[in-house]
Amino acid sequence: MVESRTRLAFLRRSRREGAIDLLFFLPLLLLLAAFLFYPLVYGIVLSLHDTQGFDLTDFVGLDHYAHAIFGDAVFHRSMVNTLLFTVAAVVLQTGLGLFLAVVLADARRGRTLLQIAFFAPFVLASVAVGTVWKFLYAPYFGIFASVGSALGFDTLAVAPLADTDTALWAVMAAFLWRFAGFNTVVYLAAIRALPREYYDYAVLEGGNRFQQFARITWPLLWPQTFPLVLLTTLGTLRIFDMVWVMTAGGPSHATETVATDVYVTAFRFLQVGYAQAMAMILLVLILLLAIVEYRVLGRRAAMVSS
Amino acid sequence: MTGLRRLHLSTVLLWLLAVVWSYPVVWTLLNAFRNSADIYRAPWDLSWPPVVGNIGEAWTRGQLGVALANSAYVTAMTVTVVLFLAIAGAYSLTRLRPPHRALLFMLVLAPLIIPTEVLIVPVFSMFRTVGLINSLPGLALFNVVANVSFATVILTGYFRTIPQDLIDAARVDGAGRVEVLLRIVVPLARPGIVAVAVLVAVFTWNDFGGSLVLIQKPDAFTVQLALSRFSTFYATDQGLTFAGMAIAILPPLLLFLVLQRSFIQGLTTGAIRR
Protein backbone atom coordinates (compact mmCIF):
# COMPACT_ATOMS: atom_id res chain seq x y z
CA MET A 1 0.00 0.00 0.00
CA VAL A 2 2.68 2.42 1.08
CA GLU A 3 4.93 1.20 -1.67
CA SER A 4 2.30 1.68 -4.34
CA ARG A 5 1.62 5.17 -3.09
CA THR A 6 5.27 6.18 -3.45
CA ARG A 7 5.31 4.52 -6.84
CA LEU A 8 2.31 6.57 -7.80
CA ALA A 9 3.97 9.70 -6.48
CA PHE A 10 7.08 8.86 -8.48
CA LEU A 11 5.03 8.30 -11.61
CA ARG A 12 3.18 11.54 -11.18
CA ARG A 13 6.44 13.36 -10.57
CA SER A 14 8.04 11.84 -13.60
CA ARG A 15 5.02 12.78 -15.68
CA ARG A 16 5.47 16.35 -14.52
CA GLU A 17 9.18 16.12 -15.30
CA GLY A 18 8.32 14.77 -18.73
CA ALA A 19 5.96 17.67 -19.31
CA ILE A 20 8.72 20.13 -18.45
CA ASP A 21 11.07 18.27 -20.80
CA LEU A 22 8.43 18.56 -23.49
CA LEU A 23 8.19 22.29 -22.90
CA PHE A 24 11.57 22.76 -24.62
CA PHE A 25 10.26 21.01 -27.70
CA LEU A 26 6.92 22.78 -27.69
CA PRO A 27 7.80 25.98 -29.60
CA LEU A 28 9.21 23.90 -32.45
CA LEU A 29 6.20 21.61 -32.38
CA LEU A 30 3.72 24.50 -32.46
CA LEU A 31 5.55 26.13 -35.34
CA LEU A 32 5.56 22.93 -37.40
CA ALA A 33 1.93 22.29 -36.56
CA ALA A 34 0.83 25.77 -37.62
CA PHE A 35 2.96 26.29 -40.70
CA LEU A 36 3.72 22.81 -41.97
CA PHE A 37 1.17 20.24 -40.87
CA TYR A 38 -1.80 22.58 -41.06
CA PRO A 39 -0.93 23.79 -44.59
CA LEU A 40 -0.47 20.15 -45.55
CA VAL A 41 -4.01 19.33 -44.43
CA TYR A 42 -5.36 22.54 -45.91
CA GLY A 43 -3.51 21.72 -49.12
CA ILE A 44 -5.36 18.43 -49.37
CA VAL A 45 -8.68 20.21 -48.80
CA LEU A 46 -7.72 22.83 -51.40
CA SER A 47 -6.89 20.16 -53.97
CA LEU A 48 -10.40 18.70 -53.65
CA HIS A 49 -12.14 22.00 -54.36
CA ASP A 50 -12.74 24.47 -57.10
CA THR A 51 -11.55 27.91 -56.17
CA GLN A 52 -12.43 31.51 -56.80
CA GLY A 53 -9.16 33.35 -56.36
CA PHE A 54 -7.81 31.71 -53.24
CA ASP A 55 -11.24 30.97 -51.72
CA LEU A 56 -12.87 27.56 -51.83
CA THR A 57 -16.07 27.21 -53.83
CA ASP A 58 -17.35 23.77 -54.89
CA PHE A 59 -16.20 20.42 -53.65
CA VAL A 60 -15.08 18.45 -56.72
CA GLY A 61 -13.61 15.35 -55.14
CA LEU A 62 -10.76 13.84 -57.10
CA ASP A 63 -11.60 15.64 -60.36
CA HIS A 64 -8.43 17.76 -60.29
CA TYR A 65 -6.31 14.68 -59.76
CA ALA A 66 -8.05 12.84 -62.57
CA HIS A 67 -7.60 15.77 -64.92
CA ALA A 68 -3.91 16.15 -64.03
CA ILE A 69 -3.19 12.46 -64.45
CA PHE A 70 -5.28 11.75 -67.53
CA GLY A 71 -5.94 14.99 -69.35
CA ASP A 72 -3.16 17.56 -68.93
CA ALA A 73 -0.35 17.32 -71.49
CA VAL A 74 1.66 20.11 -69.87
CA PHE A 75 1.55 18.37 -66.51
CA HIS A 76 2.64 15.11 -68.14
CA ARG A 77 5.53 16.95 -69.70
CA SER A 78 6.50 18.56 -66.39
CA MET A 79 6.30 15.19 -64.64
CA VAL A 80 8.55 13.52 -67.23
CA ASN A 81 10.99 16.45 -67.12
CA THR A 82 11.11 16.38 -63.33
CA LEU A 83 11.80 12.65 -63.25
CA LEU A 84 14.39 12.85 -66.04
CA PHE A 85 16.06 15.72 -64.30
CA THR A 86 16.10 13.89 -60.99
CA VAL A 87 17.54 10.66 -62.41
CA ALA A 88 20.19 12.64 -64.29
CA ALA A 89 21.01 14.72 -61.21
CA VAL A 90 21.35 11.63 -59.01
CA VAL A 91 23.61 9.81 -61.47
CA LEU A 92 25.72 12.79 -62.54
CA GLN A 93 26.06 14.49 -59.16
CA THR A 94 26.94 11.26 -57.42
CA GLY A 95 29.27 10.17 -60.22
CA LEU A 96 31.07 13.45 -60.72
CA GLY A 97 31.12 14.17 -56.98
CA LEU A 98 32.67 10.79 -56.27
CA PHE A 99 35.17 11.07 -59.13
CA LEU A 100 36.38 14.46 -57.92
CA ALA A 101 36.58 13.19 -54.34
CA VAL A 102 38.69 10.16 -55.34
CA VAL A 103 41.05 12.35 -57.36
CA LEU A 104 41.18 15.01 -54.64
CA ALA A 105 41.97 12.41 -51.98
CA ASP A 106 45.18 11.66 -53.89
CA ALA A 107 46.15 15.30 -54.37
CA ARG A 108 49.45 16.00 -52.68
CA ARG A 109 49.14 19.73 -52.34
CA GLY A 110 46.44 22.36 -52.31
CA ARG A 111 43.60 20.03 -51.41
CA THR A 112 41.82 22.74 -49.39
CA LEU A 113 42.07 25.20 -52.26
CA LEU A 114 40.76 22.64 -54.76
CA GLN A 115 37.93 21.75 -52.43
CA ILE A 116 36.96 25.41 -52.15
CA ALA A 117 37.01 25.79 -55.94
CA PHE A 118 34.63 22.89 -56.46
CA PHE A 119 32.39 23.65 -53.49
CA ALA A 120 32.04 27.43 -53.83
CA PRO A 121 29.13 27.32 -56.35
CA PHE A 122 27.04 25.64 -53.65
CA VAL A 123 26.86 28.86 -51.61
CA LEU A 124 25.85 31.02 -54.56
CA ALA A 125 22.22 31.98 -54.99
CA SER A 126 20.22 30.19 -57.66
CA VAL A 127 19.26 33.53 -59.18
CA ALA A 128 22.90 34.49 -59.66
CA VAL A 129 23.91 31.04 -60.94
CA GLY A 130 20.97 30.95 -63.34
CA THR A 131 21.66 34.44 -64.67
CA VAL A 132 25.39 33.81 -65.12
CA TRP A 133 24.76 30.55 -66.96
CA LYS A 134 22.23 32.29 -69.14
CA PHE A 135 25.04 34.59 -70.21
CA LEU A 136 27.42 31.68 -70.70
CA TYR A 137 24.89 30.06 -73.02
CA ALA A 138 24.05 33.24 -74.92
CA PRO A 139 24.51 33.02 -78.70
CA TYR A 140 27.27 35.20 -80.27
CA PHE A 141 28.92 36.43 -77.11
CA GLY A 142 28.36 33.56 -74.66
CA ILE A 143 31.29 31.38 -73.74
CA PHE A 144 29.99 28.23 -75.42
CA ALA A 145 29.21 30.03 -78.65
CA SER A 146 32.49 31.89 -78.86
CA VAL A 147 34.84 29.16 -77.61
CA GLY A 148 33.19 26.68 -79.96
CA SER A 149 33.56 28.95 -82.97
CA ALA A 150 37.14 29.81 -82.00
CA LEU A 151 37.84 26.08 -82.12
CA GLY A 152 36.37 25.98 -85.61
CA PHE A 153 32.87 24.68 -84.84
CA ASP A 154 29.78 26.31 -86.22
CA THR A 155 28.45 27.27 -82.79
CA LEU A 156 28.26 31.04 -82.90
CA ALA A 157 24.48 31.16 -83.28
CA VAL A 158 23.81 28.16 -81.05
CA ALA A 159 21.51 28.93 -78.12
CA PRO A 160 21.18 25.83 -75.91
CA LEU A 161 18.48 27.39 -73.71
CA ALA A 162 16.29 28.36 -76.66
CA ASP A 163 16.35 24.92 -78.26
CA THR A 164 13.70 22.47 -77.06
CA ASP A 165 16.09 19.53 -77.54
CA THR A 166 18.87 20.89 -75.40
CA ALA A 167 17.27 23.29 -72.91
CA LEU A 168 16.68 20.73 -70.16
CA TRP A 169 20.27 19.49 -70.34
CA ALA A 170 21.61 23.01 -70.45
CA VAL A 171 19.82 23.74 -67.17
CA MET A 172 21.09 20.37 -65.88
CA ALA A 173 24.70 21.39 -66.52
CA ALA A 174 24.28 24.55 -64.44
CA PHE A 175 22.58 22.51 -61.72
CA LEU A 176 25.41 19.98 -61.75
CA TRP A 177 27.99 22.74 -61.57
CA ARG A 178 26.26 24.19 -58.53
CA PHE A 179 25.76 21.00 -56.52
CA ALA A 180 28.42 18.40 -57.48
CA GLY A 181 30.88 20.00 -55.06
CA PHE A 182 28.61 19.16 -52.16
CA ASN A 183 28.84 15.45 -52.92
CA THR A 184 32.59 15.81 -53.42
CA VAL A 185 33.04 17.35 -49.99
CA VAL A 186 30.99 14.66 -48.26
CA TYR A 187 32.72 11.80 -50.11
CA LEU A 188 36.16 13.29 -49.58
CA ALA A 189 35.68 13.46 -45.82
CA ALA A 190 34.57 9.80 -45.82
CA ILE A 191 37.41 8.57 -48.07
CA ARG A 192 39.99 10.26 -45.88
CA ALA A 193 38.53 8.42 -42.88
CA LEU A 194 38.83 4.96 -44.52
CA PRO A 195 41.54 2.72 -43.02
CA ARG A 196 44.82 3.01 -44.98
CA GLU A 197 45.61 -0.68 -44.35
CA TYR A 198 42.95 -1.86 -46.81
CA TYR A 199 44.74 -0.06 -49.61
CA ASP A 200 48.20 -1.18 -48.46
CA TYR A 201 46.94 -4.73 -48.49
CA ALA A 202 45.40 -4.29 -51.93
CA VAL A 203 48.70 -3.00 -53.26
CA LEU A 204 50.50 -6.03 -51.77
CA GLU A 205 48.01 -8.29 -53.50
CA GLY A 206 48.70 -6.52 -56.76
CA GLY A 207 45.35 -4.75 -57.13
CA ASN A 208 45.38 -1.80 -59.51
CA ARG A 209 43.79 1.58 -58.91
CA PHE A 210 40.51 0.64 -60.52
CA GLN A 211 40.22 -2.58 -58.52
CA GLN A 212 40.98 -0.65 -55.35
CA PHE A 213 38.15 1.70 -56.17
CA ALA A 214 35.66 -1.01 -57.16
CA ARG A 215 36.44 -3.42 -54.30
CA ILE A 216 37.28 -1.07 -51.42
CA THR A 217 36.30 2.56 -51.86
CA TRP A 218 32.89 2.21 -53.56
CA PRO A 219 31.44 -0.50 -51.24
CA LEU A 220 32.73 1.23 -48.11
CA LEU A 221 31.14 4.50 -49.18
CA TRP A 222 27.56 3.15 -49.12
CA PRO A 223 26.83 4.97 -45.83
CA GLN A 224 27.54 8.23 -47.73
CA THR A 225 26.03 7.25 -51.07
CA PHE A 226 22.63 6.49 -49.57
CA PRO A 227 22.01 9.86 -47.89
CA LEU A 228 23.56 11.72 -50.82
CA VAL A 229 21.27 9.99 -53.30
CA LEU A 230 18.31 10.67 -51.02
CA LEU A 231 19.24 14.34 -50.56
CA THR A 232 19.78 14.79 -54.30
CA THR A 233 16.44 13.15 -55.06
CA LEU A 234 14.58 15.30 -52.53
CA GLY A 235 16.40 18.45 -53.65
CA THR A 236 15.84 17.85 -57.36
CA LEU A 237 12.20 16.73 -57.41
CA ARG A 238 11.29 20.14 -55.99
CA ILE A 239 13.42 22.05 -58.50
CA PHE A 240 12.05 25.51 -59.18
CA ASP A 241 14.54 28.38 -58.75
CA MET A 242 17.17 27.56 -61.34
CA VAL A 243 14.60 26.59 -63.97
CA TRP A 244 12.51 29.67 -63.29
CA VAL A 245 15.47 32.01 -63.61
CA MET A 246 17.00 30.35 -66.67
CA THR A 247 13.98 29.45 -68.82
CA ALA A 248 10.76 29.93 -66.78
CA GLY A 249 9.82 26.46 -68.04
CA GLY A 250 10.24 27.25 -71.72
CA PRO A 251 10.78 27.02 -74.60
CA SER A 252 7.30 25.53 -75.09
CA HIS A 253 7.43 23.60 -71.77
CA ALA A 254 10.72 21.88 -72.67
CA THR A 255 12.04 22.62 -69.18
CA GLU A 256 8.70 22.76 -67.35
CA THR A 257 8.97 21.02 -63.96
CA VAL A 258 6.12 20.20 -61.60
CA ALA A 259 7.10 23.07 -59.31
CA THR A 260 7.13 25.66 -62.12
CA ASP A 261 3.85 24.24 -63.43
CA VAL A 262 2.29 24.57 -59.96
CA TYR A 263 3.57 28.12 -59.62
CA VAL A 264 2.25 29.27 -62.99
CA THR A 265 -1.08 27.48 -62.58
CA ALA A 266 -1.68 28.91 -59.10
CA PHE A 267 -0.25 32.40 -59.33
CA ARG A 268 -0.65 33.28 -63.01
CA PHE A 269 -3.80 31.39 -64.01
CA LEU A 270 -5.29 31.36 -60.49
CA GLN A 271 -6.42 27.73 -60.81
CA VAL A 272 -5.49 27.32 -57.18
CA GLY A 273 -7.21 24.05 -56.33
CA TYR A 274 -5.94 22.40 -59.48
CA ALA A 275 -2.39 23.63 -58.87
CA GLN A 276 -2.48 22.20 -55.36
CA ALA A 277 -3.65 18.84 -56.71
CA MET A 278 -0.52 18.78 -58.91
CA ALA A 279 1.59 19.70 -55.89
CA MET A 280 0.06 16.82 -53.92
CA ILE A 281 0.87 14.40 -56.74
CA LEU A 282 4.46 15.63 -56.59
CA LEU A 283 4.48 15.03 -52.83
CA VAL A 284 3.27 11.46 -53.33
CA LEU A 285 6.01 10.93 -55.90
CA ILE A 286 8.59 12.29 -53.45
CA LEU A 287 7.37 9.97 -50.69
CA LEU A 288 7.39 6.94 -53.01
CA LEU A 289 10.91 7.57 -54.28
CA ALA A 290 12.17 8.23 -50.75
CA ILE A 291 10.71 4.93 -49.55
CA VAL A 292 12.14 2.99 -52.51
CA GLU A 293 15.59 4.47 -51.99
CA TYR A 294 15.40 3.79 -48.29
CA ARG A 295 14.49 0.16 -48.93
CA VAL A 296 17.07 -0.44 -51.64
CA LEU A 297 20.05 1.68 -50.61
CA GLY A 298 19.45 2.17 -46.89
CA ARG A 299 19.85 -1.51 -46.15
CA ARG A 300 23.23 -1.69 -47.88
CA ALA A 301 24.36 1.42 -46.08
CA ALA A 302 23.33 -0.06 -42.74
CA MET A 303 25.25 -3.27 -43.55
CA VAL A 304 28.47 -1.36 -44.13
CA SER A 305 27.97 0.82 -41.07
CA SER A 306 27.59 -2.10 -38.70
CA MET B 1 59.01 6.96 -64.12
CA THR B 2 55.76 6.54 -65.99
CA GLY B 3 53.91 6.51 -62.67
CA LEU B 4 55.46 9.80 -61.74
CA ARG B 5 54.56 11.33 -65.06
CA ARG B 6 51.00 10.07 -64.86
CA LEU B 7 50.56 11.51 -61.41
CA HIS B 8 51.89 14.76 -62.72
CA LEU B 9 49.44 14.78 -65.60
CA SER B 10 46.42 13.99 -63.43
CA THR B 11 47.39 16.78 -61.04
CA VAL B 12 47.64 19.23 -63.91
CA LEU B 13 44.25 18.10 -65.22
CA LEU B 14 42.71 18.44 -61.78
CA TRP B 15 43.94 22.01 -61.39
CA LEU B 16 42.81 22.81 -64.90
CA LEU B 17 39.34 21.52 -64.07
CA ALA B 18 39.33 23.57 -60.87
CA VAL B 19 40.14 26.69 -62.90
CA VAL B 20 37.34 25.92 -65.37
CA TRP B 21 35.00 25.27 -62.43
CA SER B 22 35.84 28.61 -60.82
CA TYR B 23 35.54 30.49 -64.10
CA PRO B 24 31.84 31.49 -63.87
CA VAL B 25 32.36 32.94 -60.39
CA VAL B 26 35.52 34.82 -61.28
CA TRP B 27 33.95 35.99 -64.53
CA THR B 28 30.91 37.37 -62.65
CA LEU B 29 33.08 39.27 -60.20
CA LEU B 30 35.29 40.67 -62.97
CA ASN B 31 32.40 41.65 -65.24
CA ALA B 32 31.03 43.77 -62.43
CA PHE B 33 33.89 46.11 -63.29
CA ARG B 34 33.46 46.20 -67.06
CA ASN B 35 31.00 48.09 -69.20
CA SER B 36 28.44 46.33 -71.34
CA ALA B 37 30.15 47.03 -74.65
CA ASP B 38 33.30 45.28 -73.46
CA ILE B 39 31.36 42.30 -72.14
CA TYR B 40 29.69 41.89 -75.52
CA ARG B 41 32.86 42.45 -77.52
CA ALA B 42 35.03 39.95 -75.67
CA PRO B 43 33.30 37.90 -73.00
CA TRP B 44 36.41 36.73 -71.23
CA ASP B 45 39.21 39.24 -71.26
CA LEU B 46 39.94 41.90 -68.67
CA SER B 47 39.44 45.56 -69.25
CA TRP B 48 41.64 48.14 -67.63
CA PRO B 49 40.96 50.46 -65.89
CA PRO B 50 38.04 48.82 -64.07
CA VAL B 51 34.64 50.47 -64.37
CA VAL B 52 33.60 51.32 -60.84
CA GLY B 53 30.40 53.08 -61.91
CA ASN B 54 28.44 49.82 -62.29
CA ILE B 55 28.40 49.19 -58.57
CA GLY B 56 27.09 52.63 -57.70
CA GLU B 57 24.48 52.45 -60.42
CA ALA B 58 23.28 49.01 -59.35
CA TRP B 59 22.93 50.45 -55.88
CA THR B 60 20.81 53.45 -56.91
CA ARG B 61 19.04 52.51 -60.14
CA GLY B 62 18.52 48.89 -59.18
CA GLN B 63 17.53 49.84 -55.62
CA LEU B 64 19.96 47.28 -54.30
CA GLY B 65 20.55 49.25 -51.12
CA VAL B 66 17.01 48.70 -49.86
CA ALA B 67 17.00 45.09 -51.05
CA LEU B 68 20.26 44.36 -49.23
CA ALA B 69 18.87 45.83 -46.03
CA ASN B 70 15.68 43.75 -46.41
CA SER B 71 17.63 40.55 -47.02
CA ALA B 72 19.92 41.22 -44.07
CA TYR B 73 16.91 41.84 -41.84
CA VAL B 74 15.09 38.67 -42.95
CA THR B 75 18.27 36.60 -42.65
CA ALA B 76 19.10 37.88 -39.16
CA MET B 77 15.56 37.25 -37.96
CA THR B 78 15.43 33.77 -39.49
CA VAL B 79 18.78 32.69 -38.03
CA THR B 80 17.85 33.96 -34.56
CA VAL B 81 14.48 32.21 -34.46
CA VAL B 82 15.79 28.97 -36.02
CA LEU B 83 18.63 28.80 -33.50
CA PHE B 84 16.26 29.39 -30.59
CA LEU B 85 13.78 26.72 -31.74
CA ALA B 86 16.36 24.18 -32.92
CA ILE B 87 18.59 24.42 -29.86
CA ALA B 88 15.66 24.00 -27.47
CA GLY B 89 14.14 21.23 -29.60
CA ALA B 90 17.37 19.29 -30.10
CA TYR B 91 18.14 19.63 -26.38
CA SER B 92 14.76 18.20 -25.49
CA LEU B 93 15.18 15.33 -27.97
CA THR B 94 18.69 14.31 -26.98
CA ARG B 95 19.30 15.32 -23.40
CA LEU B 96 15.86 15.40 -21.82
CA ARG B 97 13.13 12.78 -21.74
CA PRO B 98 9.87 14.15 -23.11
CA PRO B 99 7.08 11.59 -23.54
CA HIS B 100 6.88 9.94 -27.00
CA ARG B 101 10.38 11.02 -27.87
CA ALA B 102 10.57 8.77 -30.95
CA LEU B 103 7.35 10.24 -32.33
CA LEU B 104 8.59 13.77 -31.73
CA PHE B 105 11.75 12.93 -33.63
CA MET B 106 9.67 11.65 -36.53
CA LEU B 107 7.72 14.91 -36.55
CA VAL B 108 10.98 16.82 -36.91
CA LEU B 109 12.17 14.55 -39.71
CA ALA B 110 8.91 14.64 -41.69
CA PRO B 111 9.35 18.20 -43.00
CA LEU B 112 12.64 17.13 -44.59
CA ILE B 113 10.68 15.23 -47.23
CA ILE B 114 7.89 17.80 -47.53
CA PRO B 115 9.45 20.59 -49.58
CA THR B 116 8.12 24.14 -49.26
CA GLU B 117 7.36 24.10 -52.99
CA VAL B 118 4.59 21.58 -52.34
CA LEU B 119 2.96 23.77 -49.68
CA ILE B 120 3.51 27.18 -51.24
CA VAL B 121 -0.11 27.53 -52.36
CA PRO B 122 -1.78 26.83 -48.98
CA VAL B 123 0.93 28.83 -47.20
CA PHE B 124 0.30 31.80 -49.48
CA SER B 125 -3.42 31.46 -48.83
CA MET B 126 -2.84 31.38 -45.05
CA PHE B 127 -0.44 34.30 -45.13
CA ARG B 128 -2.94 36.30 -47.17
CA THR B 129 -5.67 35.70 -44.60
CA VAL B 130 -3.52 36.85 -41.69
CA GLY B 131 -1.94 39.73 -43.62
CA LEU B 132 1.62 38.43 -43.90
CA ILE B 133 2.03 39.10 -47.63
CA ASN B 134 4.67 41.76 -48.35
CA SER B 135 5.79 41.40 -44.75
CA LEU B 136 9.46 40.80 -44.01
CA PRO B 137 8.70 39.05 -40.71
CA GLY B 138 6.29 36.85 -42.71
CA LEU B 139 9.06 35.95 -45.15
CA ALA B 140 11.35 35.22 -42.20
CA LEU B 141 8.68 32.93 -40.77
CA PHE B 142 8.53 31.08 -44.08
CA ASN B 143 12.29 30.64 -44.04
CA VAL B 144 12.21 29.48 -40.43
CA VAL B 145 9.81 26.70 -41.39
CA ALA B 146 11.98 25.77 -44.37
CA ASN B 147 15.18 25.55 -42.30
CA VAL B 148 14.26 24.55 -38.76
CA SER B 149 14.04 20.80 -39.35
CA PHE B 150 17.47 20.25 -40.83
CA ALA B 151 18.92 22.64 -38.25
CA THR B 152 17.40 20.57 -35.43
CA VAL B 153 18.63 17.31 -36.96
CA ILE B 154 22.20 18.62 -37.32
CA LEU B 155 22.15 19.91 -33.74
CA THR B 156 20.92 16.60 -32.30
CA GLY B 157 24.05 15.06 -33.88
CA TYR B 158 26.27 17.55 -32.08
CA PHE B 159 24.37 17.38 -28.77
CA ARG B 160 24.68 13.57 -28.67
CA THR B 161 28.48 13.85 -28.58
CA ILE B 162 28.32 15.67 -25.23
CA PRO B 163 29.05 13.19 -22.41
CA GLN B 164 25.90 12.44 -20.41
CA ASP B 165 28.03 12.13 -17.22
CA LEU B 166 28.80 15.81 -17.42
CA ILE B 167 25.12 16.67 -17.58
CA ASP B 168 24.13 14.20 -14.84
CA ALA B 169 26.81 15.58 -12.56
CA ALA B 170 25.54 19.11 -13.06
CA ARG B 171 21.95 18.01 -12.44
CA VAL B 172 22.97 16.26 -9.20
CA ASP B 173 24.66 19.49 -8.13
CA GLY B 174 21.29 21.16 -8.48
CA ALA B 175 21.56 22.79 -11.90
CA GLY B 176 18.23 23.18 -13.67
CA ARG B 177 17.51 22.28 -17.28
CA VAL B 178 18.03 25.79 -18.59
CA GLU B 179 21.28 26.13 -16.67
CA VAL B 180 22.60 22.85 -18.09
CA LEU B 181 21.63 23.99 -21.56
CA LEU B 182 23.31 27.38 -21.30
CA ARG B 183 26.36 26.40 -19.22
CA ILE B 184 27.22 22.99 -20.69
CA VAL B 185 25.38 22.05 -23.88
CA VAL B 186 25.57 25.30 -25.81
CA PRO B 187 29.26 26.02 -25.06
CA LEU B 188 30.30 22.44 -25.90
CA ALA B 189 28.25 22.36 -29.11
CA ARG B 190 29.42 25.79 -30.25
CA PRO B 191 31.06 24.54 -33.51
CA GLY B 192 27.79 22.86 -34.47
CA ILE B 193 25.74 25.91 -33.61
CA VAL B 194 28.04 28.15 -35.65
CA ALA B 195 27.82 25.73 -38.60
CA VAL B 196 24.03 25.67 -38.42
CA ALA B 197 23.83 29.46 -38.13
CA VAL B 198 26.03 29.90 -41.20
CA LEU B 199 24.09 27.35 -43.25
CA VAL B 200 20.71 28.84 -42.36
CA ALA B 201 22.03 32.33 -43.11
CA VAL B 202 23.28 31.29 -46.55
CA PHE B 203 20.10 29.38 -47.43
CA THR B 204 17.88 32.25 -46.29
CA TRP B 205 19.94 34.89 -48.09
CA ASN B 206 19.75 32.79 -51.26
CA ASP B 207 16.04 31.94 -51.01
CA PHE B 208 14.16 32.90 -54.14
CA GLY B 209 10.94 30.85 -54.29
CA GLY B 210 9.61 32.14 -50.97
CA SER B 211 10.16 35.79 -51.71
CA LEU B 212 8.88 35.42 -55.28
CA VAL B 213 5.50 34.29 -53.93
CA LEU B 214 5.23 36.21 -50.68
CA ILE B 215 6.72 39.59 -51.64
CA GLN B 216 5.17 41.75 -54.34
CA LYS B 217 5.89 45.34 -53.27
CA PRO B 218 9.25 46.66 -54.56
CA ASP B 219 10.11 48.30 -51.24
CA ALA B 220 9.99 44.87 -49.56
CA PHE B 221 12.09 43.16 -52.28
CA THR B 222 14.92 40.94 -51.17
CA VAL B 223 18.25 40.87 -52.97
CA GLN B 224 17.35 37.79 -54.99
CA LEU B 225 14.04 39.28 -56.07
CA ALA B 226 15.66 42.59 -57.04
CA LEU B 227 18.30 40.66 -58.94
CA SER B 228 15.78 38.59 -60.85
CA ARG B 229 14.23 41.85 -62.07
CA PHE B 230 17.65 43.20 -63.07
CA SER B 231 18.21 40.87 -65.95
CA THR B 232 14.80 41.68 -67.42
CA PHE B 233 14.65 45.42 -66.71
CA TYR B 234 18.26 46.17 -67.57
CA ALA B 235 18.64 43.44 -70.17
CA THR B 236 20.83 45.65 -72.29
CA ASP B 237 23.02 46.80 -69.44
CA GLN B 238 25.14 43.75 -68.70
CA GLY B 239 27.66 45.63 -66.60
CA LEU B 240 24.90 46.69 -64.24
CA THR B 241 23.47 43.17 -64.03
CA PHE B 242 26.87 41.68 -63.24
CA ALA B 243 27.52 44.34 -60.62
CA GLY B 244 24.23 43.44 -58.96
CA MET B 245 25.08 39.76 -59.01
CA ALA B 246 28.55 40.39 -57.61
CA ILE B 247 27.04 42.33 -54.72
CA ALA B 248 24.48 39.60 -54.06
CA ILE B 249 26.88 36.66 -54.12
CA LEU B 250 29.65 38.28 -52.09
CA PRO B 251 28.14 37.99 -48.57
CA PRO B 252 27.60 34.19 -48.69
CA LEU B 253 30.85 33.67 -50.59
CA LEU B 254 32.88 35.63 -48.02
CA LEU B 255 31.09 33.94 -45.13
CA PHE B 256 31.92 30.57 -46.67
CA LEU B 257 35.58 31.44 -47.34
CA VAL B 258 36.09 32.70 -43.79
CA LEU B 259 34.22 29.87 -42.05
CA GLN B 260 34.92 27.20 -44.68
CA ARG B 261 35.99 24.55 -42.20
CA SER B 262 32.96 24.85 -39.93
CA PHE B 263 30.64 25.20 -42.93
CA ILE B 264 31.80 21.96 -44.53
CA GLN B 265 31.93 20.16 -41.21
CA GLY B 266 28.35 21.14 -40.45
CA LEU B 267 27.19 19.87 -43.82
CA THR B 268 29.08 16.57 -43.76
CA THR B 269 28.16 15.63 -40.20
CA GLY B 270 24.62 16.87 -40.60
CA ALA B 271 23.93 15.20 -43.89
CA ILE B 272 25.57 11.94 -43.11
CA ARG B 273 25.70 11.09 -39.46
CA ARG B 274 22.33 9.86 -38.40
Image (tube, rainbow, N blue to C red):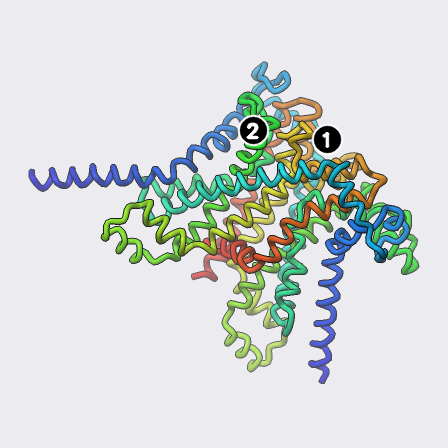
Q: Mark 1 — on which chain does it sit?
A: A
Instruction: Provide the chain ID for the residue under circle 2.
Output: B
Vertical arrangement, residue A115 with respect to residue B7, above or below: above
- Label 1 amino acid? Ala
Relative to B31, is A230 on the left or the right?
Answer: left
Q: Position of residue A160 (x, y in %)?
A: 82, 46
Q: Residue at x 35, y 52 (%)?
A: B183
**Local SS, label 1:** helix
Say which residue label 2 marks. B123
- Identify the residue at horizontal 47%, vertical 62% (top origin): A304
**Looking at the rendering, in which quadrant would you find the N terminus of chain A?**
top left
Q: Residue at x 56, y 26 (%)?
A: B132
**B193 relative position to A21: left or right:** right
Question: Residue A244: percent from the left, percent from the top?
Answer: 71, 38
Q: State the residue position of label 1.
A: A73
Q: Compared to B141, does B179 lie above or below? A: below
Which mark is on residue B108? none
- SS for tag 2? helix
Q: Position of residue A257 (x, y in %)?
A: 69, 37
Q: Nearer the viewer, mark 1 or mark 2?
A: 2
